[in-house]
Image (tube, rainbow, N blue to C red):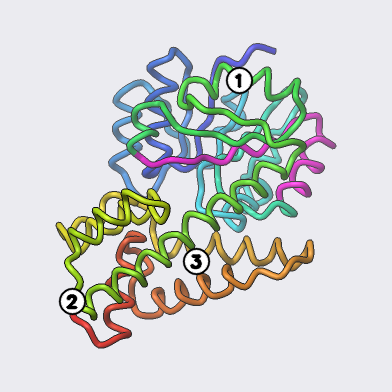
Amino acid sequence: MTIKRIGLIGVGLMGHGIGKNLIEKGYGLDVMAHRNRGPVDDLVSRGAVEHNSPLTVARAADMVILCVTGTPQVEQTVYGEYGLMGAVRDGFVIADCSTAEPASTVRIAADVEAKGGQFVDTPMTRTPKEAEAGTLGLITGGPADVLARIRPVLDCFATTIVHAGPVGAAHQMKLINNFLGICHAVVAAEAITVAARAGVDIAALRGIVMSGGAASAMFGRLIQVPLNDDDSQAQFAIGNARKDLHYYTNMTEQLPVASFMAETAHQITVMAHNMGYGERYLPRLIDVLMKVNGLKP
């Protein structure tokens, strides 16, 4: 069955760019109402059709892309009243671009497959900027034939697509990727805090770090906070970092593998959340550690 209409649930920072690019590449788009009206209204103005439930989105579309916060939201969208499961049918595909718990992904995929459909995990890398440009990275998990069928859709908004393995493998890889990125941010925030306490020249610190083996993309992004009060280089909420590290440590416990660094980084994000920084972008971990150490952010 040819995919002509796409359903999109989760029209937020990342979802808007995905939807915009799907419309521009000629696909019909069905979206669900969102608390943030701006992105939805923009997509409707471009030709998308708005619905009030996942079920009506799924009935109108050949395939649905999920771009929601995490596992509770995915499960509610699939299993809840007026959820996607009520419209699953032969040939119907659900692609989950969210960052979710792999064990849940495997369970959902089995339930969807039992009704004739397919559920694949397609979590994203990169930022809202790349979502708007149609240059996201995607990690995919699922049967090769299903992924080949939906590849033209994914190509509309991603330029890097890596197949991780069976269903659930992409969400495993995404959690590992996010663990690395978030821990790099935590380490960078601590280093910058120490530099501030010691009176180190921050511009000079950037120059030496970014020219050697200690360089990282996250350090380059976070150092913009003390230099320019700019936290826009990593538009990822601390609350989401907390959630992703929680999923990661759940995964390591299930394997089981000891994960000392993840547990430490997770507790730092919990502390930041409790201090009121949950909705702030990841670079504001610097402010958190500054306050903890008696420094003025």
Residue at horizontal 28 percent and vertical 41 percent from the top: 38
The verdict on residue 127 being magenta is yes
Q: Left or right of 131: which side holds 68?
A: right
User: Mark 3 — residue?
Assistant: 242
Residue 210: percent from left, percent from top = 32, 51
Q: Quadrant of the N terminus?
A: top right
Residue 47: percent from left, percent from top = 36, 21
- In the figure, 169 relative to 247: above or below? above
Kind of residue at disc 3: Arg
Q: Quadrant of the C terminus?
A: bottom left
Residue 54 visible in image: no
Sequence order check, earlier mark of 2 and 3: 2
Q: Mark 2 falls on what kind of element? A: loop
User: Mark 1 — residue?
Assistant: 151
- In the figure, 272 relative to 114: above or below? below
Q: Mark 1 falls on what kind of element? A: helix
